[in-house]
Amino acid sequence: MSKTVHVTSDTHLDTLLSQSKIVVTDFWADWCGPCKAIAPLYEQLSAKFSRPQKVTFTKVDTEAQKDIATKYQISSLPTFMVFKNGQTVDTIKGADQKKLVSALQKIAAEADSDSGAGGYGESSSGGSGSSWKGAGLPRGYRDITDQVDVRGLDLLNADSDFGDARGLFAGSKPTTLDAGKGKAKEDDKKDWVESDTDEQLMLYMPFQSTLKVHTIQITSIPPTEGDEVPMRPKTVQVYSNRAHVLGFDEAEGIPATQSVELRPQDWDAETGTAKIELRFVKFQNVTSLVVFIVDGDGDGEKVRVDRLRIIGETGEKREMGKLEKVGEGGD
């Protein structure tokens, strides 16, 4: 019996991406000869390498699901895409059996070892991974942090003794969670950000494509004791589609797209993560965000942030155009 899942909608695929660590997708069409030629091999590989909640094989009929094909910019058939933790890690264009078998052998090795070593590793883009998440995903949406253009990040009032803006989008689990809440080992890199002269931070993040942003997950794991203990963010203002970072004085004169006040109960006790749920209608065509941490929760002088995750939908809808058949060995 086939283990391959036939995708019935965009939401269906997003759900599969959130439920399975690795998802392999075959984009095909009934009129595509090379698609039909490689289909039996794909079914064999699906039967051999599928793992419950670890590796899921899917098929997308590009004629029936044109929105999905547009979303993933499918221009030739067949196209095979491999997703890890919701992010694209490999794409194979054409009915290239050798490339397909090689890619799926990597998947099998990784799933069986359950470590990620020697396989695809952490999903990443431009140096920013998005595998670790401090909170669950809302139904129908996925982690799109890989769309952050880390080359264009700009962070104001950050203490240079700690991490930089790129570290906020690192795919790894915060080091302080492994060492004990708020405490890093002596030899651990300080992979979090702390404010410098006061409690405010201003972060500009441009994106590689137009996004629909549903939620911002913010992780903050300050120590519970010590001198000058930093605070968690309290008031957070979010600005959409700014061309550059805002100055602190400038931000006072510009209405935020949304302002949120985080309460102590909003922070997850295990991961130190709070979810900022945005007014989705106001964040539909987003090319950049500015996150302004106005103040912290407490009497301290500094604020700490360990990780940020962007949750939503990625990809600007474009005209699909005519799909091209690519035979074995084609690219």
Image (spheres, rainbow, N blue to C red):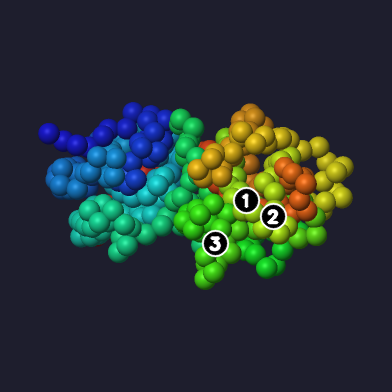
Nearer-the-camera pick, 131 or 87: 131
Q: Which residue is mark 3?
A: 184
Label of residue 142 in the image: none
Kindly tell me whether residue 250 is visible in this rendering.
yes
**Viewport quadrant of the C terminus:** bottom left
Label of residue 229 in the image: 2
How far across and how far down the image is residue 295, in percent? 76, 45
Q: Are marks 1 and 2 in contact (CB under 8 Å)?
A: yes
Judge left or right: residue 78 versus residue 126: left
Q: Earlier in the sequence, mark 1 or mark 2?
A: 1
Q: Residue at x 39, y 33 (%)?
A: 15
Q: Which residue is mark 1?
A: 224
**Type of amino acid under label 2:** Val
Q: Residue at x 70, y 67 (%)?
A: 160
Badge 2: residue crowd in 10 Å (few <14, some 14–19, many ≥20):
some
**Type of amino acid under label 3:** Ala
Count of labels in the image: 3
Judge left or right: residue 170 versus residue 61: right
Nearer-the-camera pick, 35 or 303: 303
Dot 3: element: loop
Judge left or right: residue 122 versus residue 235: left
Q: Residue furthest bottom?
A: 187
